[in-house]
């Protein structure tokens, strides 16, 4: 019997909400019959948007939430005070097992706070990390952590490595994924105090395939499948990655349009170039899952369009079908024993 995965979606979160969020939800249910969506937000607004689409009415439902949490609000205060917000009500569905996962392009701070206060951590998990997939020359790498734990300890990074390994093996399908810690050199004695303390712990961790240090320039080449760091470093890597990709694409377009000769050449290479650049589009991988929680929480980019929202919803299917939470819990508890 086919598993139905129910995903609660923050319909009001993100720069392009609710239109692009709702469009993404419709695209998700039309593309895969294994998923159903609960759109949480202002009911009348959502219903008006849904009228323009054709979809299975039984697989998209609406839960009304009168309030919204913005990026300008203090996350902890907003989550505690705005009980009728789309983020809080959607996460509560996950907490109460009325939904399997939660997706939002809204306030990152509120999502991170709500994930821990409402959904809660798995037993044994010290800090849940955000873990986006990065496009590389060899496919994808998981960057863990990219924004949840700025002041992490060595024990946190070891757990990140274990959780990331579980995710890459069972969701992405990479057997015995290579794990590396972000460093400023390949030598074991390199790095700051946190890296120096964490390196030997990862080296002696038999449950992961630790390959040593990885420098930032090696990440796009795909030298590691799981890239471990604390959130400050991870967020800098992620934002530089995104900014550089945008700049390079802009310069390529500028160069191709600079002369008549280049314009003719651009027409000839356009199909191949478009296919190549598609591999570097991070939106195809969906959002960043927050690992180590009792339910799945996925944070999409604030400027997500329908394509990324759709993929964020669909990525919840493998997470549920592969029972990732149980595998993470078993890994952490066994290894901590």
Image (cartoon, grey):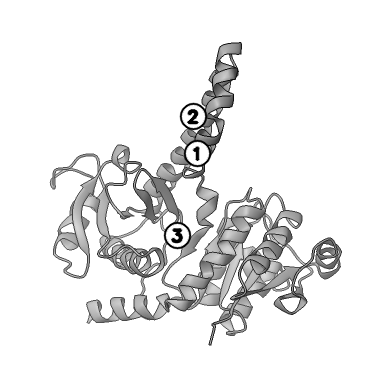
Q: Secondary structure at mark 1?
A: helix
Q: Is residue 51 left or right of residue 252?
A: right
Name which quarter of the figure residue 104 lies in: bottom right
Residue 10 in view here: no
Residue at image x 39%, y 49%?
234
Residue at image x 71%, y 50%?
16
In the image, which disc is placed on residue 248?
Answer: 2
Name which quarter of the figure residue 187 lies in: top left
- Quarter of the picture containing the C terminus is bottom left
**Label 1 belongs to which residue?**
277
Mark in front: 2 vs 1: 1
Q: Residue furthest bottom?
A: 1
Q: CA distance from mark 3 to mark 1?
A: 25 Å
Residue 287 in view here: yes
Q: Is residue 45 left or right of residue 217?
A: right
Task: Mark 3 or mark 1: name the one nearer the start of the chain.
Answer: 3
Mark in front: 3 vs 1: 1
Name which quarter of the figure residue 209 lies in: bottom left
In the image, which disc is placed on residue 130?
Answer: 3
Q: Is residue 122 above or below residue 44?
A: below
Horizontal and vertical percent position of residue 318? 47, 71
Q: Secondary structure at mark 3?
A: loop
For label 2, count other residues whose C-alpha is less than 10 Å away and answer few (under 14), some (14-19) or many (20+).
few
């Amino acid at each position: 019997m086919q598993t139905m995965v129910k995903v609660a979606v923050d319909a009001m979160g993100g720069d392009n909400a609710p239109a692009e969020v709702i469009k993404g939800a419709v695209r998700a249910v039309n593309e895969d019959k294994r998923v159903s969506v609960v759109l949480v937000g202002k009911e009348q607004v959502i219903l008006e948007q849904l009228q323009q689409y054709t979809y299975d009415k039984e697989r998209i439902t609406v839960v009304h939430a009168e309030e919204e949490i913005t990026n300008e609000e203090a996350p902890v205060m907003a989550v505690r005070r705005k009980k009728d917000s789309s983020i809080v009500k959607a996460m509560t569905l996950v907490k109460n097992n009325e939904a399997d996962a939660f997706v939002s392009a809204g306030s990152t701070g509120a999502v991170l706070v709500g994930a821990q206060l409402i959904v809660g951590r798995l037993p044994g998990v010290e800090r849940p990390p955000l873990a986006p997939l990065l496009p590389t020359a060899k496919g994808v790498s998981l960057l863990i952590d990219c924004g949840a734990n700025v002041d992490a300890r060595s024990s946190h990074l070891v757990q990140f490595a274990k959780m990331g390994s579980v995710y890459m093996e069972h969701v992405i399908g990479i057997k015995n994924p290579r794990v590396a810690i972000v460093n400023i050199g390949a030598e074991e004695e390199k790095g700051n105090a946190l890296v120096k303390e964490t390196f030997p712990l990862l080296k002696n961790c038999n449950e992961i395939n630790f390959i040593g240090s990885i420098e930032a320039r090696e990440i796009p080449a795909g030298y590691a499948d799981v890239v471990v760091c604390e959130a400050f470093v991870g967020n800098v890597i992620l934002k530089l990655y995104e900014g550089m990709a945008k700049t390079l694409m802009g310069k390529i377009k500028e160069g191709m349009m600079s002369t008549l000769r280049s314009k003719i050449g651009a027409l000839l290479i356009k199909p191949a170039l478009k296919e190549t650049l598609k591999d570097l589009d991070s939106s195809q991988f969906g959002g960043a899952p927050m690992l180590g929680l009792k339910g799945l929480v996925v944070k999409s980019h604030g400027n997500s369009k329908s394509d990324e929202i759709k993929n964020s919803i669909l990525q919840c299917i493998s997470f549920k079908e592969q029972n990732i939470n149980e595998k993470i819990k078993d890994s952490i508890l066994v290894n901590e024993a």
